[in-house]
Amino acid sequence: MRKLPFLFAILILSFLLVSFICADLNGFFLIPTSGSIHTIGIECDTSTIAWGILHPAEQKTITINVRATGNVPVILSISAQAWQPATEPQYLSFSHDYQNQQITSTWFPITLTLTVDANAVNINQFSFNIEIVGTEP
């Protein structure tokens, strides 16, 4: 019979902990993210990116490796497309460190960066695709 108050206290503490973790505390919230990489004329060492959990004013970088699929070097075009929901680019920005180097059949690292605006609010989840196109110079 004495176990009942103890179990009830554990239940209440668990509820409060879950409520605290899920609460929006002055703009502090977690943003689960995901994305896909689509390539044309090149090969990439991954086809998906798990950005992880992001907070407002946070920046996350991930390095991928790409290479040309043929014997001719290529120049890349890298863009973020198909944002879901479509309004998210106002609070999120995608960038990379690629500077128009010629890409050969040797693996070449590219750092991708996702930045969350400090004023981002009410973002529960989002996704977008990264398109990387290799064309002959």
Image (cartoon, grey):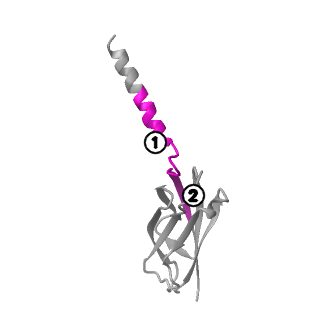
Residue 38: quarter of image: bottom right
Regarding mark 2 in the picture, which secondary structure is present there?
A: loop
C-alpha span from label 2 to label 1: 18 Å
The quarter of the picture where the C terminus appears is bottom right
The quarter of the picture where the N terminus appears is top left
Question: Is 74 colored magenta in this rendering?
Answer: no
> Which residue is found at the position 55% from the left and 63% from the top?
117
Magenta range is: 12-37
> Which residue carries the number 1 mark?
21
* Above or below, comparing residue 23 to residue 112 in the picture: above
41 with respect to 12 (left or right): right
Residue 84 x %, y %: 64, 57
Residue 80 x %, y %: 60, 68
Of the two numbered discs 2 and 1 on the same chain, state the one appearing first in sequence. 1
Q: Amino acid at mark 1?
A: Ile
> Which residue carries the number 2 mark?
120
* Above or below, comparing residue 31 to residue 112 in the picture: above
Is disc 1 surrounded by few (<14), some (14 to 19) or many (20+) residues within 10 Å? few
> Which residue is found at the position 52% from the left and 86% from the top?
73
Q: Amino acid at mark 2?
A: Ala
Name the one closer to the observer, 25 or 80: 25
